[in-house]
Image (cartoon, helix red, strand yellow):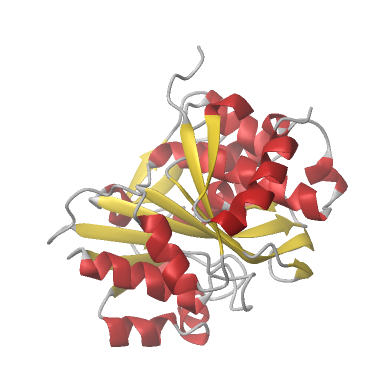
């Protein structure tokens, strides 16, 4: 059945992350956050610098906005290409947490604070473990980067960023969920299925720079010079793929309609977000964003 709700993706052309994110967050209605728990999922898969990892100014701007709203903030993370605690130390997250006053949860350290999730029609053998820190939050804010992925999934944006929420090992029996994921021919569908476990109030994509090839830790650098915001991860990733296509990207990311990309297709099937390009409204927040928004719309509708 066709979705009646239009998914809005806001785009601002800027290299000033603080002012750009503040402008975007005006459109993200998170409700009253005074005294409530806001959980952040950023992108710290490795300690490599932006756009491999969340830019410190992007995280700082999001933290400042949420603190001004009175939220009690926690950032939770699991790195896939390094020791999580060391990655967070090397990228300056731990130092920022001390200075700005927010909590950090290293998901690898959790023992009992997990719930098994098995989405409808799941390609996971026995579901996956998802942490209570996100399930119990009053608001989840995600921030992702614009990247291709040379190992699997083809691209890593908001949908794939959710992989860092899932337990690597079952703390009870040691089962390795990431081995299952990376060894499966259904990897892209499984990535999408993780996103059925939660719903963010906002996703911020930092596409001031990105990787159009390679990734996730290093690749061909592009400079779109934009920040994007949406509540819809499917719409966000569809727009992100369109941006990659504007700049020239890998064969796998370039082929066919954007909604035929397996991550996006499976997420749409699960009702996580937009089902077609027509479900997406791209909104230029400033005049400078108008040109790239038109190009994104053209790429979205190509078959």
Residue drawn at x 63%, y 40% as measured from the top left: 238
* Nearer the observer, 224 or 238: 224
Extreme residue toward the right, this view:
251
Image coordinates of residue 271 in percent, x first then y, are 47, 26
Q: Position of residue 58 (x, y in %)?
A: 47, 71
**Residue 94, quarter of picture:** bottom left
- Describe residue 269's horizontal placement relative to residue 185 as left or right: left
Question: How many numbered marks does the figure carry?
Answer: 0
Q: Position of residue 140 (x, y in %)?
A: 34, 53
Q: Residue furthest top?
A: 1
Depth order, front residue of 243/269: 243
* Residue at point 24%, 70% (across, down): 67
Nearest the viewer among 256 and 61 is 61
Which quarter shows the C terminus?
top right
Residue 167 visible from this viewpoint: no
35 left or right, relative to 206 = left
Instruction: Tell me, yes or no, if residue 15 can be seen here.
Output: yes
Q: Residue at x 67, y 38 (%)?
A: 297
Furthest-left residue in this view: 35
Query: Which residue is pictured at 52% across the width and 56% down the height?
Result: 286
Q: Is residue 59 above or below residue 260?
A: below
Residue 213, image x, y percentages? 80, 60
Nearest to the observer: residue 22 or residue 191? 22
């Amino acid at each position: 059945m066709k979705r009646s709700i239009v998914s809005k993706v806001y785009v601002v052309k800027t290299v000033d992350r603080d002012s750009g994110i503040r402008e975007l967050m005006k459109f993200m209605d998170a409700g009253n956050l005074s005294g409530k728990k806001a959980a952040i999922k950023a992108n710290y898969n490795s300690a490599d610098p932006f756009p491999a990892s969340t830019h410190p100014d992007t995280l700082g701007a999001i933290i400042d906005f949420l603190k001004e709203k009175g939220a009690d903030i926690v950032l939770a993370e699991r790195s896939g290409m390094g020791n999580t605690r060391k990655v967070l130390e090397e990228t300056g997250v731990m130092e920022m947490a001390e200075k700005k006053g927010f909590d950090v949860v290293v998901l690898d350290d959790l023992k009992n604070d997990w719930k098994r999730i098995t989405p409808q029609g799941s390609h996971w053998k026995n579901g996956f473990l998802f942490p209570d820190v996100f399930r119990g939050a009053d608001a989840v804010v995600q921030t992702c980067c614009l990247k291709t992925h040379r190992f699997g999934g083809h691209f890593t944006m908001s949908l794939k960023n959710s992989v860092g929420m899932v337990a690597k090992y079952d703390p009870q029996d040691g089962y390795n969920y990431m081995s299952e994921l990376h060894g499966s021919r259904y990897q892209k569908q499984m990535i999408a299925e993780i996103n059925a476990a939660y719903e963010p109030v906002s996703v911020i994509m930092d596409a001031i720079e990105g990787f159009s090839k390679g990734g996730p830790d290093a690749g061909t650098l592009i400079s779109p010079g934009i920040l994007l915001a949406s509540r819809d991860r499917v719409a966000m990733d569809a727009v992100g793929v369109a941006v990659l296509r504007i700049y020239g990207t890998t064969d796998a990311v370039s082929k066919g309609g954007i909604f035929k990309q397996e991550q996006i297709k499976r997420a749409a099937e699960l009702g996580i977000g937009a089902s077609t390009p027509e479900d997406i409204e791209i909104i230029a927040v400033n005049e400078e964003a108008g040109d790239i928004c038109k190009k994104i719309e053209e790429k979205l509708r190509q078959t």
